[in-house]
Image: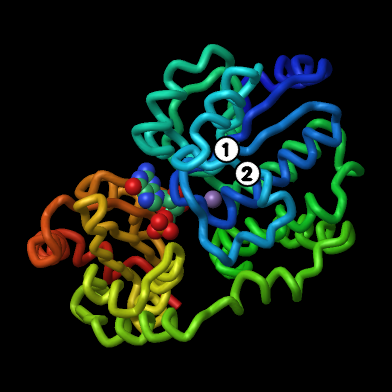
């Protein structure tokens, strides 16, 4: 755990500040939840906080309290640049290195004249003036709860803040089932329910938002699934053509990789998704046990993340990407076979 210059930050926050809060590209429930929770909290403390996201996030997150106030860097560039200019401090939430916001926004942020505060749970963070980094944490939302606690302000957590934090903890822990979910996580969740988070509604808002075409896309993905029993590995592919056929929208592929990992005996699940716009294959990796997909994604696919959930990319076409992927597995055979024991 790294906690850097917290007391100085606390003193800086005694005076009212103009603050921007920034999440990563393709924001997920944890990025959106933590950013909006922090915004509500800082506003309550008398600051003016504006959330900036690099690009769009999925529909199933649009109901989160405060969602309408978010500026998107790709669409509302002027407002974003203005907010950055006016601000005296920038929080970076749920990512570890500036390039995770995408190259356009990274360019702008690299010229930022004030200080950054990083709150994040990904491995190998870059160095910033103020940091709270802990890879043992279930989610950045859990860390924002801790941050508010360290500020001595748990009593300021209201229904909106509790709802945002609950959402991110829930989505990043796969509904409280991953290894990173501790008794402390559950205690925080209990407190958030006491403070007004309506757990049944949050689960329903996030998880029961399927459309017919999304289910058909899932059906296609599942029929593309391949299992490699020798390596306890299963992978799914999705081509641009298949995405188009089922009217793919942002967020539709979220979570599909978990079906690969849900197969009995499988410890390594992967989904390869063709992205014509970026000219890449976007890859999500998931594992059970000791096999580190963070390291695997870093070594071969220009990515990273956590030990059991990471992402990366390939600039080859789908066929060559799969060939390359399959050539890597023999080297990891022992690690994969011994990764996880029930
Ligand atoms: P997902 O597969 O859901 O996109 O991402 C899983 C985890 O890996 C998330 O924590 C995400 O932040 C991280 N991740 C996804 N893609 C990348 C990437 O290209 N680079 C790095 N460093 N992390 C990534
Ligand atoms: Mn996260």
Residue located 12% across and 60% down the image: 317
Q: Secondary structure at mark 1?
A: strand
Query: Which circle marks residue 52 in the picture?
Result: 1
Horizontal arrangement in the rendering, residue 62 relative to residue 291 (left or right):
right
Residue 201 picture quarter: bottom right
Examine the rendering and report whether any part of residue 64 can be seen: yes
Residue 162 picture quarter: bottom right
Disc 2 to disc 1: CB gap under 8 Å: yes
Vertical placement of 41 versus 334: above or below?
A: above
Examine the rendering and report whether any part of residue 307 can be seen: no
Residue 220 pos. (x, y %): 30, 84
The N terminus lies in which quarter of the figure? Answer: top right
Report the label total: 2
Query: Which circle marks residue 35 in the picture?
Result: none
Residue 93 pos. (x, y %): 57, 39
Q: Could you say which is closer to the camera, residue 112 or residue 123? A: 112
Q: Is mark 2 within 8 Å of ligand 2?
A: no
Q: Could you say which is closer to the camera, residue 3 or residue 101? A: 101
Query: Which circle marks residue 70 in the picture?
Result: 2
Q: Could you say which is closer to the camera, residue 253 or residue 6? A: 253
């Amino acid at each position: 755990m790294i906690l850097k210059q917290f007391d100085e930050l606390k003193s800086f926050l005694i005076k009212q500040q103009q603050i921007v809060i920034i999440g990563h590209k393709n924001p997920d429930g944890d990025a959106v939840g933590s950013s909006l929770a922090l915004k509500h909290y800082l506003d309550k403390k008398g600051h003016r906080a504006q959330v900036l996201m690099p690009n769009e996030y999925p529909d199933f997150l649009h109901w989160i309290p405060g969602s309408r106030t978010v500026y998107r860097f790709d669409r509302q560039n002027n407002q974003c640049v203005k907010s950055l200019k006016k601000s005296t401090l920038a929080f970076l939430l749920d990512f570890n290195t500036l390039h995770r916001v995408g190259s356009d926004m990274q360019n702008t942020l690299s010229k930022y004249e004030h200080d950054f505060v990083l709150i994040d749970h990904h491995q190998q963070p870059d160095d910033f003036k103020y940091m709270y980094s802990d890879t043992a944490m279930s989610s950045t939302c859990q860390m924002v709860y801790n941050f508010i606690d360290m500020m001595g302000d748990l009593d300021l957590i209201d229904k909106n803040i509790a709802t945002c934090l609950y959402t991110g903890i829930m989505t990043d822990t796969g509904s409280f089932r991953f290894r990173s979910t501790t008794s402390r996580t559950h205690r925080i969740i209990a407190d958030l329910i006491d403070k007004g988070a309506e757990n049944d509604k949050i689960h329903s808002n996030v998880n029961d938002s399927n459309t017919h075409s999304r289910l058909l896309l899932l059906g296609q993905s599942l029929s593309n699934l391949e299992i490699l029993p020798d390596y306890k590995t299963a992978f799914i592919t999705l081509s641009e053509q298949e995405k188009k056929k089922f009217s793919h929208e942002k967020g539709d592929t979220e979570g599909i990789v978990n079906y690969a990992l849900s197969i009995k005996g499988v410890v390594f699940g992967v989904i390869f998704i063709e992205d014509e716009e970026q000219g890449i294959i976007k890859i999500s990796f998931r594992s059970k046990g000791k096999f580190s997909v963070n390291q695997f994604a870093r070594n071969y696919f220009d990515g990273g993340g956590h030990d059991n959930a990471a992402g990366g990319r390939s600039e080859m076409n789908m066929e060559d990407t799969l060939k390359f992927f399959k050539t890597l597995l023999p080297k990891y055979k022992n690690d994969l076979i011994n990764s996880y024991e029930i």
